[in-house]
Image (cartoon, rainbow, N blue to C red):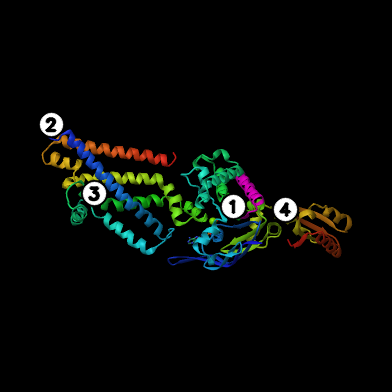
């Protein structure tokens, strides 16, 4: 059972690939998803920059992308991925669908976090003559910060799952090892090791997220 | 000088098929230096009214004029500058939980991009004023309700406003803490010469600090005037019931019963304020006039450092003598009103 064809170097490389995919898509996905989440909060009816057109355009777009399962999304946008990175195989190619998958997810999570902020805080901000940008920057984001950290944590864990899936179709990372060795070559050790690595990643991320969120909430 | 003026204000909320007329034909003037109270039962429109002053809510009709400027003629950026002249405190304080007390008080100054040194000086000065200098580094979570409201007041004062709006600022506090917050508001009014507008449903709050009051019901102002006048002779039944929560000026039932039995006497309600209230007028009356006076009920209340006396007097005497006695009391500054059993 402890015989395996996978070398330690391969495991390390796979882990690095997974972290790279998660990190890159989280970074770019946040750069898209956080502003998007803010936009749907402030443009919604009764928001500080209420705007029917922007809201009614953004809201369904987010829903539509969110309703496509990642495994389908990944395959469906292969032509687009080719245009962007020149290939549809490998870690960089996996990042494209990962970004498209995670951005609307982050937007929704951010939306929920921001909606949790006590409306009285916004009212106080407006009574001080804060500009909409100041309301977002000095009131909305700091008050939602703890909750935003937890949202990003949730998004990161979602991404780890998705990268593993990407691995199954040649995306690289630990998912790739699980499929090529664990599944196709009955390498039980490789399979178990993959699961253990994923558990460690998820646990590590969730715990650090919780610690940071508690700090942000001054608990 | 008039600080806040409302001219035939209307405010209608439309939601789907439901329209609510929150305010109907409101006319109001708050003078510079006033502590103006607005009282009314829940849903009367008090919050809507106060939120018009800093345009958190826009009227559907009429004009709001603050410090001589019509708010509806202002651009968004002018309006924001105007809002810095109007501080506001809230029932649930609305402090930023993620920031220290120092930063909470500093935030209006940060929004105005004031230099750091100036912010520090001003914030420390304000924390001193509210008596919470030692809490600068604490978070709102670590403070009591009364302390939070003090921070709310300091924050509202940071940008040196001319007006302070208070929407149910003491409604979440116990009576003793309410007292201390009201005293603080009084100091804000006196030491910084800030016009204060207080929204409340407690008549004791009005009695404690206000000099003028408006009573609201169903979106309308049903009575307004100086606190002494409104407490002295409330006209509207709602006003009367509010006044009764702090001044018990009903004739006791037992007295009413004896009233019905004697038929050759007349009963008057006497109301007198200020210096004349401290003169022994009843004594003088009995000495100089051929009437018998019986005090059925007496109440003395301190409002605005002035005494307000309300008495129910029973007079017996020849018709003309009673008239003369009443005349004497009126000359002494009393408000007389005949009561029929
Ligand atoms: N945003 C809104 N949309 C629709 N109706 C509203 C809105 N705000 C207030 N109203 C209605 O306007 C009326 C007056 O409300 P307002 O909050 O001014 O009363 P209030 O005197 O402050 O009451 P309370 O003492 O309970 O705070 C109520 O009938 C209320 O339902
Ligand atoms: Mg209210």
Looking at the image, residue B52 sits to the left or right of residue A161; the answer is: right
As measured in the structure, the alpha-carbon distance from the residue carrying label 2 to the one carrying label 3 is 32 Å
Residue B280 image position (x, y, % from top left):
83, 52
Residue sitting at 18 percent across and 56 percent down? A79
As measured in the structure, the alpha-carbon distance from the residue carrying label 2 to the one carrying label 4 is 103 Å
Q: Which residue is mark 1?
A: B160
Q: Is residue B226 above or below residue B183?
A: below
Using the rendered image, report if marks 4 and 3 lie on a common chain: no
Residue sitting at 45 percent across and 56 percent down? A132
Q: Return the mark for residue A95.
A: 3
User: Do we see residue B200 in this rendering?
Assistant: no
Graded by Cα atoms within 10 Å as few (under 14), some (14 to 19) or many (20 or more), the crowding at tag 4 reads few
As measured in the structure, the alpha-carbon distance from the residue carrying label 4 to the one carrying label 1 is 55 Å
Which secondary structure dominates the residues rendered in magenta?
helix
Looking at the image, residue B323 sits to the left or right of residue B255; the answer is: right
**Segment colored magenta:** B173-199
Q: Which residue is mark 4?
A: B254
Q: Which is in the foreground here, disc 4 or disc 3?
A: 3
Q: Is residue B229 above or below residue B110?
A: below
Graded by Cα atoms within 10 Å as few (under 14), some (14 to 19) or many (20 or more), the crowding at tag 1 reads some
As measured in the structure, the alpha-carbon distance from the residue carrying label 4 to the one carrying label 3 is 88 Å
CB atoms of marks 4 and 3 within 8 Å: no
Using the rendered image, report if marks 2 and 1 lie on a common chain: no
Q: Return the mark for residue A3.
A: 2
């Amino acid at each position: 059972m402890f015989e395996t064809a996978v070398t330690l170097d391969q495991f390390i490389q796979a882990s690095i690939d997974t972290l790279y995919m998660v990190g890159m898509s989280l970074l770019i996905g946040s750069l898209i998803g956080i502003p998007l989440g803010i936009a749907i909060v402030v443009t919604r009816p009764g928001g500080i920059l209420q705007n029917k057109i922007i809201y009614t355009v953004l809201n369904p777009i987010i829903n539509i992308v969110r309703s496509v399962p990642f495994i389908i999304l990944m395959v469906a946008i292969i032509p687009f991925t080719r245009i962007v990175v020149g290939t549809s195989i490998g870690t960089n190619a996996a990042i494209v669908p990962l970004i498209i998958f995670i951005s609307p997810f982050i937007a929704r999570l951010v939306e929920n976090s921001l909606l949790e902020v006590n409306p009285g805080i916004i009212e106080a901000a407006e009574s001080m003559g804060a500009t909409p940008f100041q309301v977002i920057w000095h009131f909305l984001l700091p008050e939602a910060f703890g909750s935003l950290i937890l949202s990003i944590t949730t998004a990161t864990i979602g991404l780890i799952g998705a990268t593993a899936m990407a691995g199954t179709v040649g995306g690289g990372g630990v998912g790739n090892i699980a499929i090529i060795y664990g599944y196709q070559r009955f390498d039980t050790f490789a399979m178990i090791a993959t699961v253990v690595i994923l558990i460690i990643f998820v646990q590590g991320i969730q715990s650090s997220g919780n610690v940071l969120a508690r700090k942000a909430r001054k608990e | 000088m008039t600080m806040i003026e409302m001219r035939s204000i209307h405010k209608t909320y439309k939601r789907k098929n439901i329209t609510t007329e929150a305010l109907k034909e409101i006319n109001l003037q708050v003078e510079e230096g006033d502590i103006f109270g607005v009282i009314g039962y829940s849903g009367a429109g008090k919050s809507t009214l106060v939120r018009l002053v800093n345009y958190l809510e826009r009227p559907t009709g009429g004009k709001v004029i603050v410090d001589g400027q019509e708010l509806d003629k202002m651009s968004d950026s002018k309006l924001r500058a105007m809002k810095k002249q109007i501080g506001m405190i809230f029932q649930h304080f609305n402090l930023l939980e993620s920031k220290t007390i120092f930063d909470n008080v500093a935030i209006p100054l940060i929004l105005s991009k004031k230099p750091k040194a100036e912010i520090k000086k001003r914030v420390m000065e304000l924390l001193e004023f509210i008596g919470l200098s030692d809490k600068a580094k604490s978070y709102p979570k670590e403070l009591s309700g009364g302390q939070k409201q003090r921070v709310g007041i300091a924050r509202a004062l940071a940008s040196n406003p001319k007006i302070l709006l208070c929407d149910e600022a003491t409604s979440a506090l116990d009576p003793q803490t309410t007292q201390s917050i009201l005293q603080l508001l009084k100091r804000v009014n006196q030491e910084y010469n800030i016009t204060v507008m207080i929204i409340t449903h407690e008549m004791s709050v009005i009695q404690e600090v206000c000099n003028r009051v408006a009573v609201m019901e169903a979106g309308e102002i049903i009575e307004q005037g100086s606190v002494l006048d409104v407490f002295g002779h409330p006209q509207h039944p709602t006003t009367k019931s509010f006044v009764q929560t702090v001044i018990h000026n009903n004739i006791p039932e037992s007295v009413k019963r004896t009233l019905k039995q004697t038929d050759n006497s007349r009963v008057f309600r006497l109301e007198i304020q200020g210096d004349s209230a401290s003169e022994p007028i009843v004594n003088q009356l009995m000495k100089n006039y051929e009437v018998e006076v019986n005090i059925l009920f007496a109440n003395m209340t301190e409002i605005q450092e002035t005494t307000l006396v309300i008495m129910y007097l029973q007079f017996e005497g020849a018709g003309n003598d009673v008239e003369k006695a009443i005349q004497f009391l009126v000359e002494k500054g009393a408000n007389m009103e005949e009561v029929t059993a």
